[in-house]
Image (cartoon, rainbow, N blue to C red):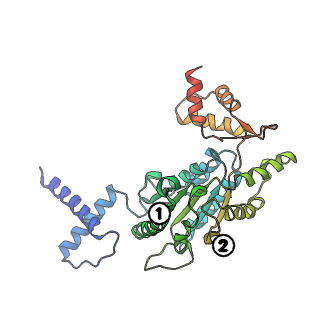
Amino acid sequence: MTTTHKTFLGYVLISSLVVNAFEPITTTVVAGASGAAAIAAGRKIYNYFFESCDSKWIAFNSTGLEVDLYQKLFGQHVVSSVVLKAITGFKKTENPKKPLVLSLHGWTGTGKNYVSQLIAENVYKKGMASSFIHQFVATAHFPHQSQIENYKSQLQHWIKGNVTNCPQSMFIFDEMDKMHPGLIDSIKPYLDYYEKLDGVSYRQAIFIFLSNSGGEDITQVALDFWREGKNREEIKLKDLETALSLSVFNNKQGGFWHASLIDKNLVDFFIPFLPLEYKHLVQCGMAEMAAKGLEPNYALADQVARDMIYFPKNENIFSVKGCKTISSKLDLYRDHA
């Protein structure tokens, strides 16, 4: 092995030891010039090969997010507008006064998880695979009511530890409608307007809540617009946000029931995902074909969309499952074509 190779491997080993020894706790290192140089070199090499909390790995792409929201997300003009403004405004603020807190609501298959993914892909170089994105699913991570006090403690420690490690962390809470009431308020201090808590600032973090709750209210507004002959695109955030926040706050079965996060106005935006129509399912089908590397086939997308189940019963306007099963349906129809 050459001297160069030995030196390189030595720096890699040093970098690994340095990171394990000094992260996430800040430590004062007293060392000679050669020791300090070795540590600096080790960190530099480690950060080159492994994800680190800096601009090389975390850099917001505003244009990319705008293109993704308007070209890849279908039937959600309110979502596209609000999410773009919220993320852009937050990331461009040098010293935000609090973390960004978004609550996404709507029926299954309307794009809530997909929007979280688009945000991740335009903030973190590794997208959803980033070690700075932390996802919780209520039924998987917090299944037992009897363990709620343990969950509260674990959640607090998890968030504090990860924000200490990287202030620009993102936390996604899925199935908020299935979370035990009272649990989410355990993280209220981290979402508030504090400069620091126990020496840790949470102001650069992003918290995203996903929930099916409020779906009925959202659907009723969309249905009223349709019955009145109004264009779907005329629906504004103001038509839904207040009713939506009250709905989830008063839902005794959901994780936001009488939550102080809502009562203290710590959720920046309640974002409604409208139920999808036939034309949106066709768009989903065409986009799915492109993602699979298939030749575009409008007739196939049309067939899949037409065979989906719609509601209300007599009007058949909105898809029951949204775009959730489009991918598997396409595979099935192609195999039997």
Residue 60 shows in this picture: no
Q: Determine the image quadrant of residue 241.
A: bottom right
Give the residue displayed 37% in from the left and 58% down from the top.
51
Percent of width and height locating residue 314: 82, 37
Circle 2 — which element? helix
Name the kind of residue labelled 1 in the image.
Gln
Image coords of residue 3 (percent x, y)? 12, 55
Q: Residue furthest front?
A: 146
Do the numbered discs 2 and 1 sit on residues whose CB atoms are within 8 Å? no
Looking at the image, can residue 280 be seen? yes
Relative to 280, is 204 above or below? below
Q: Which residue is under mark 2?
A: 263
Q: Nearer the viewer, residue 240 or 165?
A: 240
Q: Gap in Å between the C-alphas at discs 2 and 1?
A: 25 Å
State the residue at coordinates (61%, 62%). Answer: 102
Say few, some or many: other residues with alpha carbon within 10 Å of mark 2 (under 14 / 14 to 19 / 20 or more). Answer: few
Q: Is residue 247 left or right of residue 92?
A: right
Which residue bears the numbered disc 1?
147
In the rendered image, residue 210, in percent from the top left (x then y), is placed at 59, 56
Q: Residue furthest right?
A: 228
Q: Residues within 10 Å of mark 1 (few under 14, many from 20)?
A: few
